[in-house]
Amino acid sequence: MDNKHNLPSPAKFWTWFNPIGRQTGGWAFILNRVTALGLTFYLFLHLVMLGQLAQGPEAYDGFVALMHNPIIIIGELLVVAAGILHGLNGVRIILTTFGVSITRQKQLFYALMAVAVVAILVFGIRMFTA
Amino acid sequence: MSQNKWKITLKIHRQKEAEAPHFDEFALDVDPDEYVLDAVERVWAFMDRTVCFRHACHHSTCGACGMRVNGVEKLTCITYIRDVTQDGGTLKVEPLRNFPVISDLAVDMGSLYSRLDTVGARSVLPVTQAEAEKKPADWPAGDEQYIRLADCIECGLCISACPSAATSSDYLGPAVLAGAQANGLKRNPELLGLVDTEDGLWRCHSAFECTAVCPSFVDPARRIMDLRKQVFVERFSRVFRRS
């Protein structure tokens, strides 16, 4: 019988990102994976862009001008947001792994995400007004 | 029981031998205070005798009727219809994930049972070892002789809901790790080699979905974290024992 579709498989990694039917801890799990992938992509992009700097003064000036583009600033804010969300979510996992607030992991997640929103807003205001 | 009847559409996952999985729809008049399992049974009794599903006790003790209801793992014998749909709504019933489908809604839970045996999970235990037991002041002496059923009813909902279990067939899974925790590393040091592995404790990524769907308040996520602590203490103390 073909019942493989219902069995565990590494090819089902995409189900990690499916929010349907998930609850608070599941959303935290999804958020951690999405932000981790975003940060990994950024690291790759960052190295590529740094490589451009080695191509002389003109390339450097062009790169600096590009960094003032509002779209790039929004991109940088997304990187900052991903770092804050991933880091604070990691704090939740560390605390619960050591038994701290384990029966209140939902409240811990909401509290840390509230901190994250405030931190992202502060960074956003500073980045767009600098 | 409510006086009002609801008209609902029950979408049942169907899959027989060598057949591609699909859904069959059944229009039902139901009492919203009935359970989801009642609706599935009504389809089987009056509309389609080939519908295959597992059920036994109908009071959340046997753990046989676990299914996914509108995408969420539920023990269908204690899930009110009014809690999962509305008048004119749809109820989508699917088999548990991460187990092979035998037929329609029935899955083969053999892997769960054999793994529970591997870690020596007990179905009954002395009341003195039951975490949830609150001993009354007049509890008689020699209470080791009194036993009770373990909280876990081996329904498999936690394995189905766990995102880590979806991608690794070797992962022991929440119910099994909770069973190991209930046994305790101190009483069973040989468990260390089973749970302190990539597909044991460390495969858990703290999604807490197991605890969210557990109908029996086993709280597998808390038990996994507690077992990690036990493993950490054991490894740490081994360093000093060697030196």
Image (tube, grey):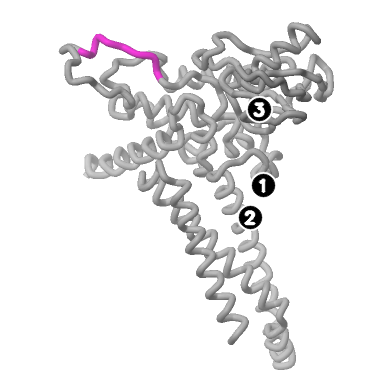
Could you say whether the residue bearing mark 3 is in a helix, strand or loop? strand
Residue bearing the label numbered 2: A34
User: Measured from the top left, where is residue B202 in percent x and y?
Assistant: 47, 41
User: Measured from the top left, where is residue A6 in percent x and y?
Assistant: 70, 28
Residue bearing the label numbered 3: B68
Q: How far apart, in angstroms, are the residues tagged by discs 1 and 2?
A: 8 Å
Q: Please state if B196 lies on the left or on the right of A35 as rendered.
A: left
- Tag 1 and tag 2, C-beta contact below 8 Å: yes
Q: How far apart, in angstroms, are the residues tagged by discs 3 and 2?
A: 25 Å
> Which residue is depicted at the point 51% across and 19% down?
B154
**Quadrant the N terminus of chain A occupies:** top right
Residue bearing the label numbered 1: A17
Against B109, is A45 above or below? below
Say which label, 1 or 2, has the lower sequence index: 1
At label 3, counting other C-alpha atoms closer than 10 Å, the crowd grade (few under 14, some 14-19, many 20 or more) is many
Against B133, is B233 above or below? below
**Stretch of the chain drawn in magenta:** B143-150
Please state the chain letter of the residue tagged with numbered disc 2 in the rendered image. Answer: A
Front in this rendered view, residue A46 or B144: B144
Front in this rendered view, residue A120 or A4: A120
* Viewer-side label of 1, 3: 3
Residue type, label 2: Val
> Which residue is depicted at the point 57% across and 53% down?
A32
